[in-house]
Amino acid sequence: MICDLSPSERVRQRAWSRRGRQLRASQSEKPTVRGGRAKNADYRQREYLTEGEIDSLLVTAGTRRNPTRDRLLVLMAFRHALRVSELVDIRWQQIDLDTATIHIRRAKNGTPGIHGLQGDELRLLRAHRREHPHADFVFLSERKALLSIDGAQRRVAQLGVAAELPFPIHAHMLRHAAGCALASRGIDTRTLQAFMGHRSIANTVVYTAVADKRIRNIWGK
């Protein structure tokens, strides 16, 4: 429904969607079609997560083997509408804990920006920095190497299964969740465009259409 992925990220998204379905195979039936795979819409009816589902992911991440990193991974992807490639590429030099800001570098020729960091992010970032005081990149693998795009995708997909969400998820759904959540709060389209880093406002209006309360409440008028 909403698509601003690069070609390589689309390939990875499809791969992790398939893996997520395999992980959930024992919990639900999968639709089948003759001669191959069903369409994405047959597995998942939307490409974004609700704020409640984000909260479920955060709670679940806090129970995992690397709770600080995993909670930070979900929270920052959502809070700053990050593509997975932008997420794993975050370096500590982009973050200023004293001024509570982060410089966002966008992929796909998107517009960069400076975002504020909220209190929960700051607490996690400070704790994470204490665990890795000499790291260059924020997100590291279990072997202390840079967390790969595939590694981040796998982590998000696994969290979705552990949180018992009703469909397999992928990391880009966190970015979509941010756009939909902010649009539903009445953020104007131009501001949302700047926040999302979209060069074209055409990519932004999709979120406002999804969150349009005039349509949602049309029978209540």
Image: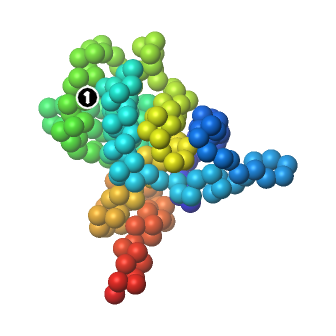
In this view of the protein, which residue sits in the foreground, 182 or 91? 182
> Is the residue 36 above or below the residue 71 in the image?
below
Residue at numbered disc 1:
125
Q: Residue furthest toward the bottom?
A: 221
> Residue at point 50% right, 37% down?
161
Query: At numbered mark 1, what does the secondary structure look like: helix, strand or loop?
Result: helix
> Residue at point 37% right, 42% down?
56
Residue 80 appears in which quarter of the rendering? Answer: top left
> Is the residue 193 above or below the residue 26 in the image?
below
Q: Could you tell whether 38 is left or right of 60 in the image?
A: right
Q: What amino acid does circle 1 point to?
A: Leu
Q: Could you tell whether 71 is left or right of 203 in the image?
A: left
> Residue 45 appears at what percent x and percent y?
56, 58
Q: Residue furthest toward the right?
A: 35
Q: Which corner quadrant holds the N terminus? A: bottom right
Residue 205 appears in which quarter of the rendering? Answer: bottom left
Q: Could you tell whether 175 is left or right of 5 in the image?
A: left
Q: Which corner quadrant holds the C terminus? A: bottom left
Residue 25 appears in which quarter of the rendering? Answer: top right
> Residue at point 58% right, 53% down?
44
Q: Could you tell whether 20 is left or right of 112 in the image?
A: right
Q: Is residue 172 visible?
A: no
